[in-house]
Amino acid sequence: MGRSPEELATGEWAVLAALAEGPTHGFAVARLLAREGDAGQIWTVKRALVYHSIDNLIELGLAERTGAEPSESGPRRTMLRATSRGKRRVTRWLDQPVDHLRDGRSLLMLKLLFLSRRGADPTRLLEAQRAEFERMAGHFEAGTTEGEGFTPTLALWRLENARAGIRFVDRLLAR
């Protein structure tokens, strides 16, 4: 039994979101996700893992090969794109807030980047994310006075990060 398309790793989401932008080839996706690429500044994926992710996405029915085109610097390049199912899944993913504070730095930033690249309004995601950060802050607030030892210290750290996330989202919404 294989994986569900809902269980994609962060790098696979980034590859699928890139393929959902339109027909491209693996090398272009690898450049986007390289350290100096737009998405690579947020989440870096080595070229070999980009191609492995592409194979996984094809196997899951979220991407497909569409032919080949000549390359100026080497062999013909296999053209790829997200399937209709893959595009729908990316669109839903882009609207879902992250549910772990630690994912604000990676998944939330990737979602905002790919929404920007689409020319899409991020308001829906940002409003949902603000509500999620508020929920987290409430949970962590209670933890700052409960427990013993290091537990309140950790809760305070998480609370302050949730508050920073709320301020960040508020600033984006105010633009």
Image (cartoon, grey):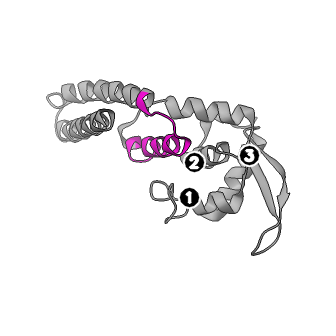
User: Vertically, is 117 above or below 87?
Assistant: below
For label 3, the SS is strand
User: Vertically, is 45 above or below 92?
Assistant: below
Q: Nearer the viewer, mark 2 or mark 3?
A: 3
Residue type of the residue flagged with mark 1: Leu
Q: Position of residue 146 (x, y in %)?
A: 17, 27
Disc 2 to disc 3, how far (Cα)?
Answer: 13 Å
For label 2, the SS is helix
Residue, far bottom: 73
Report the predominant secondary structure element of the magenta stretch. helix
Which sits earlier in the primary sequence, circle 3 or circle 1?
1
The residue lying toward the viewer, choosing from 23 and 141, is: 23
Whether residue 171 is visible to the viewer of this picture, yes or no, is yes
Instruction: Give the numbered dot on residue 14.
Output: 2
Which sits earlier in the primary sequence, circle 2 or circle 3?
2
Crowding at dot 3, Cα within 10 Å, few <14 / some 14-19 / many 20+, comes out as many
Q: Quadrant of the C terminus?
A: top left
Residue stretch rendered in magenta on the structure? 103-123
Q: Which residue is mark 3?
A: 81
Crowding at dot 2, Cα within 10 Å, few <14 / some 14-19 / many 20+, comes out as many
Instruction: Give the numbered dot on residue 33.
Output: 1
Residue type of the residue flagged with mark 2: Ala
Q: Quadrant of the N terminus?
A: top right
The residue lying toward the viewer, choosing from 98 and 25, is: 25
Q: Nearer the viewer, mark 3 or mark 1?
A: 3
**Disc 2, disc 1: CB below 8 Å?**
yes
Disc 2 to disc 1, how far (Cα)?
Answer: 8 Å
